[in-house]
Image (cartoon, rainbow, N blue to C red):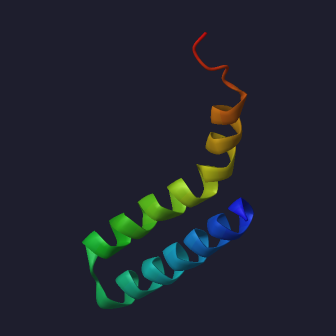
Amino acid sequence: MLSTISMILEGLALIGLIYGYIKKNRNLMLISALLLWFGSGLEDFVRGWKSVPGPT
């Protein structure tokens, strides 16, 4: 499930980057780049978060 969400985020980010480049919209390209960055690191972040022990 988590890998599916990551793939969807990465796909949307790539589409946003291409569309922003074609329309010369820097803000859309920035948001898409951040979305691509978060989408690619989401799975590792959640895996690391689950391995941290809770308060005792």
Of the 4 image quadrants, the one containing the N terminus is: bottom right
Residue drawn at (50%, 73%) of the image: 13
- Residue 17 in percent (x, y) is at 45, 77
Tell me which residue sits at (42%, 69%) in the image: 32
Tell me where residue 7 appears, x and y as whole percent: 67, 70
Q: Tell me residue 22's x, y (percent).
A: 38, 90
Outermost residue, front side = 56
Q: How many marks?
A: 0
Query: In the rendering, at what x and y percent does residue 39 appear?
Result: 57, 60
Give me the residue at 26% from left, 70% from top: 27
Is 14 in front, or is 6?
6
In the image: residue 43, left or right of residue 28: right
Residue at 59% across, 77% down: 11
Please tell me whether residue 45 is drawn above or below residue 26 in the rendered image.
above
Q: Is residue 35 left or right of residue 41?
A: left
Image vertical order of residue 10 relative to residue 46, above or below: below
In the rendered structure, the answer to whether residue 28 lies left or right of residue 41 reads left
Q: Is residue 29 above or below residue 16?
A: above
Q: Is residue 8 above or below residue 33?
A: below
On-image quarter of the C terminus:
top right
The picture quadrant where one finds residue 9 is bottom right
